[in-house]
Amino acid sequence: MRVQVAAFYRFVPLASEELPDWQARLLTLGRETGLLGTILLATEGINGTVAGSASGVAALLELLQADPRLAQLEVKRSETEGRAFHRFKVRLKAEIVTMAEPSAQPSLGTGVPVPPEHWNAVLGDPGTLTIDTRNHYEVALGSFEGAIDPGTETFSDFPAWVEQHLRPLVAQQRPQRLALFCTGGIRCEKATAHLLNQGFDQVLQLQGGILNYLEQVPEAESRWRGECYVFDQRVALNHQLQPGSYHVCHACGLPLAPADLALESYVAGVSCRHCIDRFTPADRERFAERQRQMGRAEAFGEAHIGRAMPPTGA
């Protein structure tokens, strides 16, 4: 069955007292329309990715955008076959994308947005230092030519990388501008807000992120290389925004190339090259039992909700 996937976010002040009501309303609508996915709510805004029927997705977006504060919600749509998620969750969080840096407030100012059609010119300018704000396991699947990989495990590592590596690099190279990008734009907004707060200037960001670039820029003109990791069961998307060649390890939730499946470290649902040394024997047995349950569920044509993925936008 073909379903619509919508990724959306908006940095906008929300009162803490209203969040439980938003949570209840969204959960009710999700159940009524059969949506799956995750929505995060915090006093700094909303961030979510959901999948379902076109009418269900439209009903959700209509509910959100009826609030004037969310009328300009950033939304990216795509389609996929089968389930992109296995549950519907609405969670109240301290941040909609975790940086653990209170001074980074996108609602007070972010980098200058660069439309996808102008991004290649930014990349080709020798005065630009281009930075991939995503995590190392995402960058490993694909990135823009020449972009710096901070090598972060999670987005909350980004501020430390700025102080330890980016600031000395800028002092040495003296670039005219910094250009940041991420999957859909949300991490760039927070990352550029942080850079501006820390005294950096001439900061740009790819408008709508990689997904918007892949949608708007013809592949023949593209500077993107590889696939784009996404935080759902599709794992990664190619330039046509269709599921690519990567799989996911159901033990740790990290992406695996086809060649990784042939390694001794890979046991379906139990271990992979990323997590072979991370879990105890008891964990492995638990994962193996989950894998057996998933196999039985699939044999009967049923969905199993025990598949692991990293947290959205981590």
Image (cartoon, rainbow, N blue to C red):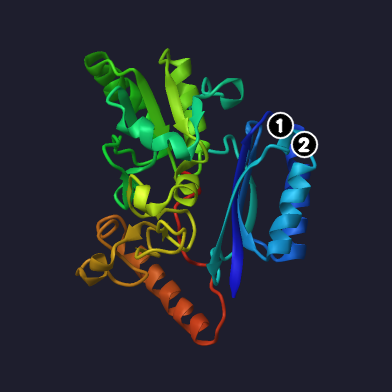
Q: Can see residue 207?
A: yes
* Residue drawn at the location 77% of the way across and 64% of the way down: 32
Residue 222 point in image, percent of width and height: 36, 47
Is residue 307 toward the left or the right of residue 60 in the image? Answer: left
- Residue 172 occupies quadrant: top left
* Residue drawn at the location 60% of the way across and 67% of the way down: 3
Q: Which mark is residue 55?
A: none
Residue nearest the viewer, comparing 179 with 31: 179
The mark closer to the camera, 2 or 1, is: 1
At mark 2, the secondary structure is helix
Residue 162 point in image, percent of width and height: 34, 24
Badge 1, how many Cα within 10 Å: few under 14, some, many 20+? some
Amino acid beneath label 1: Leu
Residue nearest the viewer, comparing 292 with 132: 132
Quadrant of the snapshot with the N terminus: bottom right
- Residue 59 occupies quadrant: bottom right
User: Marks 1 and 2: in contact by CB < 8 Å?
Assistant: yes
Is residue 189 toward the left or the right of residue 44 in the image? Answer: left
Q: Which mark is residue 18?
A: 2
Amino acid beneath label 2: Glu
Q: Which residue ends up furthest to the bottom in the rendered image?
A: 300
* Residue drawn at the location 37% of the way across and 37% of the way down: 120
At mark 1, the secondary structure is loop
Question: Where 29 sits versus 106, above or below?
Answer: below
Is residue 64 toward the left or the right of residue 174 in the image? Answer: right
Q: Which residue is mark 1?
A: 14
Q: CA distance from mark 2 to mark 1?
A: 7 Å
